[in-house]
Amino acid sequence: MRPKLVVGNWKMNGSRAANASLLTGILEGLADAKAACAVCVPAPYLYQCQDLLQDSPVAWGAQDVSCHPVGAYTGEVCMSMLQDFGCRYVIVGHSERRAYHGETNELVAKKAKAALESGLTPIVCVGETLEQREAGQTMDVVNAQLDAVLELVGPDAVAKLVIAYEPVWAIGTGKTATPAMAQEVHAAVREKLRACNAEAAQTVLVLYGGSMKPDNAADLMAQPDIDGGLIGGAALKAADFLAIIRAAQ
Ligand SMILES: O=C(CO)COP(=O)(O)O
């Protein structure tokens, strides 16, 4: 059986004071929680995470990274900087980056590859818009997103990926995919991974994201191919994030 993983994506939220109180609250409530967890925070707060979370069960990471190793790329943050601050994870290809920053499947694949080469675990986000779902294109979209990554990183790297299925229409809207709807896509994602590397596909974690909350987390994560959650809004409240971590056990 695969272990569960619950990752908070703070998006562009936080302040030093708010983060300190959120992280302290999570750490205090974590004693009875067994599922693995992590927070992906805005880059300026990585140092604060390293400071507060090192030697704790909570891992941390970033929400994006440059595909370039170093140099004249104003405004970008590169992989070695994330390593400098002890990151274990980096989210790549979140739908908000695809939609608002023009990230293509090819760029997302380059970022995933760069993460793997630096020893970080990329959390590769895939998912369809409402329009695409209604047009029956969900798997075409998700497969194209996955194909770009799998082709670039190759079969040997599959075991080192984390995939997050995040239907765009469920993000921040309060509309969650039903457990059955999510499971259908998760199973198809695993099938796609299996075609690339059958053995690795058994162990790759496929997280669900999109309005996962304490009251729907257990049902979603009870599905055979849903291995945890990528949590937005509910990751900003210690009690809710902890409740989701407990639901994952
Ligand atoms: O985008 C998400 C996580 O990456 C999900 O956000 P919400 O949980 O706020 O819907």
Image: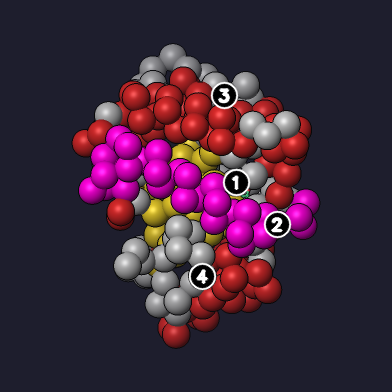
Identified at 40% across, 59% down, the residue is 59
Magenta stretch: give its range.
173-201
Distance from mark 1 CB to nearest ligand 1 atom below 8 Å: yes
**Residue under circle 2?**
176
Q: Amino acid at mark 3?
A: Glu
Q: Is residue 86 above or below residue 156?
A: below
Nearest the camera: 30 or 213? 213
Reading the image, the residue beneath label 1 is 166
Q: Nearer the viewer, residue 181 or 36?
A: 181
Residue under numbered circle 3 = 103
**Residue at image mark 4:** 222
Q: Is 204 displayed left or right of 45 in the figure?
A: left
| Viewer-nearest of discs 1 and 3 | 1
In magenta stretch: residue 226: no
Residue sitting at the far front: 136
- Name the residue located 48 percent from the left edge and 36 percent from the top edge: 92
The mark nearer the N terminus, 2 or 4, is: 2
The alpha-carbon separation of the residues under discs 3 and 2 comes to 24 Å
Mark 3 or mark 2: name the one nearer the start of the chain.
3
Decide if residue 207 is on the left or right side of residue 160: right
Three-letter amino acid code of the residue under disc 2:
Thr
Residue 46 in sight: no
The answer to whether marks 3 and 4 mark residues whose Cβ atoms lie closer than 8 Å is no
